[in-house]
Amino acid sequence: MTAKSFESMEETDYLLRSHANAARRLAAAERVRMRRALIGGTAKERPDVVEESDDE
């Protein structure tokens, strides 16, 4: 295991120690998953979806 992987696991453990924080993070992750599953159609059909650009 790399040091970076270990640090990532430690940070995740720290962030999920609090039940309230864990619930917020899991709910946010689920919203991201659902939004990805729901994205479709044109910008006119889905004005709430902002398209990302690689131009930056």
Image (cartoon, helix red, strand yellow):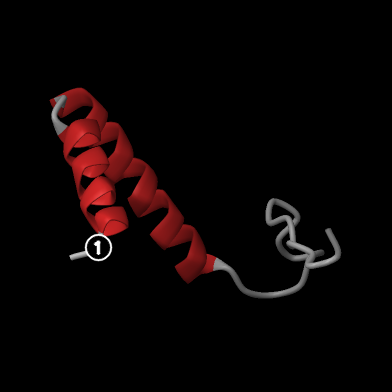
Residue 33 image offset from top left, x and y in percent: 40, 61
At horizontal 86% and vertical 65% (from top left) the residue drawn is 55
Q: Residue furthest bottom?
A: 41
At horizontal 21% and vertical 52% (from top left) the residue drawn is 6
Quadrant (top left, top right, bottom left, bottom right) of the N terminus: bottom left
Question: Could you tell whether 51 is left or right of 21 in the image?
Answer: right
Residue 50 image offset from top left, x and y in percent: 73, 55
Question: Could you tell whether 1 is left or right of 36 in the image?
Answer: left
The answer to whether residue 48 is above or below residue 38 is above
Quadrant (top left, top right, bottom left, bottom right) of the C terminus: bottom right
Question: Could you tell whether 25 is left or right of 49 in the image?
Answer: left
The front one of 15 and 8 is: 8
Marks counted in the figure total 1
Q: Residue furthest front?
A: 3
Question: Could you tell whether 28 is left or right of 47 in the image?
Answer: left
In the picture of the structure, the residue carrying the numbered disc 1 is: 2
The answer to whether residue 39 is above or below residue 19 is below
